[in-house]
Image (cartoon, coloured by chain):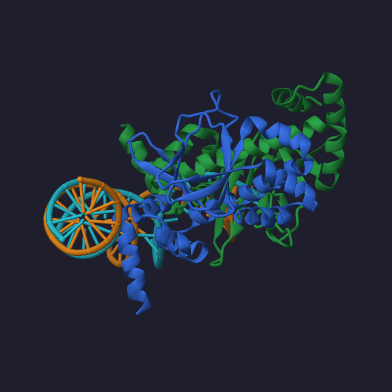
Chain colours: A green, B blue, C orange, D cyan
Amino acid sequence: MVIKDILYKYMSRWTSLNEEDQQAIVDEIHIEEFKKGTVLFKQGDVPTTCYFILKGCVRQYSIDEEGREVTSNFFTEEQAIAVFNHHKPDKSSDYTFTCVEDSVMVVGDLDMEKDMYSKHPQLESMTRRMIEENFSQVQEEFAAFIASSPEVRFKTLLLKRPSLIDRVPQHQLASYLGLTPESLSRIKKRIHQDLR
Amino acid sequence: MVIKDILYKYMSRWTSLNEEDQQAIVDEIHIEEFKKGTVLFKQGDVPTTCYFILKGCVRQYSIDEEGREVTSNFFTEEQAIAVFNHHKPDKSSDYTFTCVEDSVMVVGDLDMEKDMYSKHPQLESMTRRMIEENFSQVQEEFAAFIASSPEVRFKTLLLKRPSLIDRVPQHQLASYLGLTPESLSRIKKRIHQDLR
DNA sequence: CTCGTTTCTTGACTTAAGTCAATGCACGCA
DNA sequence: TGCGTGCATTGACTTAAGTCAAGAAACGAG
C-alpha cells in the first residue's frame, strides 16, 4: 500500500528510528478509509481514538448555545487529530469531527497508547514534539487572528492554506474565519475588484 | 519560605510523588523575584529558561509589521510560561514577556530539563499533562474568540478572569481582546448603562 | 435528466468598531 | 507638592460587518 510511504516519510522527519523499527511500528498501525460526511466523533462523546490524516480533510466544530455551528479548525494531510481534555471530569469532547472529503487516516487506539510507548520509546518523544509544535502553531494562529480584521484573516488564509478555499464549503470557511457567509462573499468580491 | 507551599499544593494535584521526592524537587528548584516591568525575554531572543508563576502577572506580546503591540496572553498564578518553537530553525521567540506586576516565579533552566526528567520521571509526565491541558485551554479560548463579538469577548473575560481587569492597563486588555482602546472604553460604558 | 435542497450572492438597512482629534485624569518623578 | 507624560474617555465621522430577505447557482438523490 503506497499510502504507507507518507508515514515513513513523516516518521523519518521526526525520529531517528532505523528501518526495522519503523517497519514494526507501521505494521502495527491501523489505516482506515472514511467517506465524505463521516463523523469521527461527536460533541459530548468520549473519544477513544486519535487520527493522523494521510489524505483528505476533516472539520472540527461545535454547536454553541444559540445553536450555531462554530468551525474551529480544518485538518488536512500530515496533521494529527487528538483531543486533550484532561481538565474535564467526564473527558468528553467539546467538538464534533467530520470528514469534508473522502479521507484516509491512521487510527490510533488511545487505550493502546501506553503499550506502544513502552514498546517504542521514541514514539513517545515524537508524539510530544508533535504536540508542542501543534501548540505553538495554534498559539501563533490565535495571535494572528486577534490582531487582524476579517478581510486580512481571509487573505492570510489564501496565502497559508490556499487549498482549503477549494476544498471546503464557503459557509464553513466563514464560520472558521469568525464571520457570516454574506460578509465572506463580499470580502471575496472586494478582493477581486482590487485586483483589477 | 511560605511561597513554596503553592508549589507543593500544585505538585500534589498533578503527581503522586511522596513527600521526600517532592522535597527533593522543590529543593533543586530556583525561585526568583522580578520587579514590575522586568522583561523575561524579548521577541527574537532564544529562550533558555521557562517559568512558573507563584505570584504576579506576565504579559505576552509581539510587535507586528505595522509596529503595533499585539498582546496574545496574560499569565497569572499557577500558570506556566514556556515557548515551543521547535518549528523555527533558529528557535527564537516570536514574543516578548514582561512582568505587569512585581512577580515571584519558579525559573527552570531548559538545559537542565532532561537531567531533571531522568532524575524524576514523574516530572516529565506532569509536564506533558500540563502542556496538554494548556493546549486544550488555548484551543477552547480560540474557538470562543472566533465565535464571539468584541463585546461578548469582554463579558466572557469579566466572568473567567475578573482579576485581570484590575491588574492590567486597559489598552493592553484592548489589544488582548483584539480591539482599540476607544472601543473597549465604549463597551464598558454600554455594559454599565445596561446594568441600570 | 429533473426536482428539490442547500449554498452562494446581492441588495437595503442597522449597528458597532475603527480613526482622528480633543479633553480630562492619574500616576510617577523630581 | 507640582508638573509632565502617558492613559482613559468622549465626540464626530467613516467604514465594514451583521441582519433580513430574495433570487441565482450548484449539488445530490432518485
Vertical relation: B175 (above or below) B186:
above
- Residue A99 visible, this orientation: no
- Residue A97 visible, this orientation: yes
Furthest residue to the front? B1
| Nearer to me, B93 or B99 | B99
Vertical relation: A140 (above or below) A9:
below
Q: Is residue B139 left or right of residue A45?
A: left
| Nearer to me, B9 or A137 | B9
Q: Position of residue B5 (x, y in %)?
A: 65, 56
Q: Position of residue A149 (x, y in %)?
A: 38, 46
| Nearer to me, B143 or B193 | B193
Furthest residue to the top? A19
Marks counted in the figure total 0
Q: Is residue A129 left or right of residue A173?
A: right
Residue shown at 76% from the left, 22% from the top: A16
User: Residue A20's image quarter?
Assistant: top right
Residue shown at 56% from the left, 58% from the top: A69
User: Residue B29's image quarter?
Assistant: top right
Q: Is residue B173 left or right of residue B3?
A: left
User: Residue B169's image quarter?
Assistant: bottom left
